[in-house]
Amino acid sequence: MTGAPLAGKRILIATASNWPSTAALPRLYGRGGAHVTVLCHPAALVALSAYTNAVVPVDGALAATVSTLREHLRTHAYDWIVAGDDPLVTELLREPDRAWLRPWFPFDPEDPAAIGFATSKHAFLDIARAWELPIADYELCATPESFASAAARFGFPFVAKARTGHAGGMVHRIDDLAAARAIWDRYGGAVLAAQRFVHGRVGTIEVLWDHGVPRCFMGAYKVDCHPSDFGAASAKQPFRDPALEAIARKVGAITGYHGFGAIDIMHDDRTRAFSVLELNPRPSGGGFTLTGGIARGFYPAYRAFLDGAPFANAIDLGSRSAPVPLFPNTWYYFVELADKRRPRAWLRAAEALARAPFDDRRLVLKYLRVFAGYYAERSALGKALKNRIKRIFRLTSIRHPGAVYDLTKAGPENR
């Protein structure tokens, strides 16, 4: 890359989680020449990036992150501020006085419709239907009888959604009546959304909105999700379709979104139509770095966004290419495939390592150490190797080096 299109720009990334997608952001901004400050636990992945210029330390708890961010912004100014994870966005919206959020938050922090659309799976469905955004048919079920009725209407499989959740953790595929009863009992009678299952490919539209109008966007299918069909992708396959911009524009009109966000979508195999699943009110991390998106328009669009420069048309940064393995996501999926003796697992893992951001060496080494622990605990072959090492070196355990968070458990669920 030539030049430094973001030179002189100061960006703050705040996060209370330890997601690889957030850890990719300093590199995305820093390679463009921006000065990147992160507000996070000092042992978080994002703090290890070579493109992180300064760290504002917090203890990692949500409440502490919010209070530290509030106090930090009293005395420091930035060209842009990023809330890097869904839990932090939700916690910020619990603030009794949200006036301090208004200058930089990605949508109006006091607009009930925008808040509901971005943070509640149930409110999202109601608002999307009112705005005629394409979604699969659904029912909000407050009783076991209404849930059973929805199951009968939609048939199996169908999808059950709790009101809130992230990384696919509160979204469930229901394949039979026993599973429907188990999910209803699991949530203790709380309202659940039952939604018709769409057979097709899950994807995302990553968007940079400018006061509700997309400046640039990119569509990508999610490939080989882990640990469930609704979890993180181990690879992404960029694509183009004229329908994506229309979806991005309507979501922008609903929320007035300003900044980076991502829209989860489903591409129906039978009708070839798109349906919208939810809005992720934070940057998804790495999509714009997958292909030639940076060279073809991302940095100029982002610089113009920060400068408030006028623009006429959104830039489609998508492409038509084979799936691109994501590092480190693919490696967690690799464990599952390797234990099933699938040769393509080794090819996918090797390609992901080849695409690892080795210019961010400390972060890559951390990922490799974390994965070694995960592999030793989850893989049959890994367990055998671990036991062999124990016998050889008379070790009582393999310790996770320098752990503050339990990264080995969180890893495969991160976005």
Image (cartoon, rainbow, N blue to C red):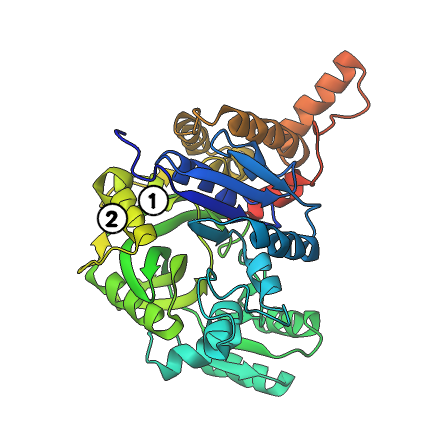
Q: Is residue 85 above or below residue 31?
A: below
What's the amino acid at mark 2? Leu
Image quadrant where residue 365 sits: top right
Q: Residue flagged by tag 1: what amino acid is it?
A: Phe
Residue 138 image offset from top left, x and y in percent: 46, 79
Whichever of labels 2 and 1 marks the residue nearer the N terminus, that label is 1
- State the SS at label 1: helix
Image x and y of residue 38, in percent: 55, 42
Q: How far from the left and from the top, in percent, is residue 47?
A: 57, 36
Q: Which mark is residue 9?
A: none
Q: Quadrant of the N terminus?
A: top left
Above or below: residue 132 compared with residue 101: below
Picture residue at 58% right of the left edge, 81% below the top: 147
The residue carrying mark 1 is 288
Q: Residue at x 81, y 15 (%)?
A: 394
Q: Quadrant of residue 126?
A: bottom left
Cα distance between the residues tagged 2 and 1: 8 Å
Residue lying farthest top?
392
In the rendered view, tell whether residue 158 sits above or below residue 50.
below
- In the displayed structure, does residue 63 sit left or right of residue 45? right
Q: Secondary structure at mark 2?
A: loop
Q: Position of residue 385 (x, y in %)?
A: 66, 22
Between residue 147 and residue 73, name the one nearer to us.
73
Few, some or many C-alpha atoms within 10 Å of disc 1 (few <14, some 14-19, many ≥20)? many
Disc 2 vs disc 1: Cβ atoms closer than 8 Å? Answer: yes
The residue labelled by disc 2 is 317
Question: In the picture provided, is 391 more to the left or to the right than 250?
Answer: right
From this viewpoint, which residue is outermost toward the front? 75
Q: How many marks?
A: 2
Q: Is residue 342 visible?
A: yes
Tell me, yes or no, if residue 155 can be seen here.
no
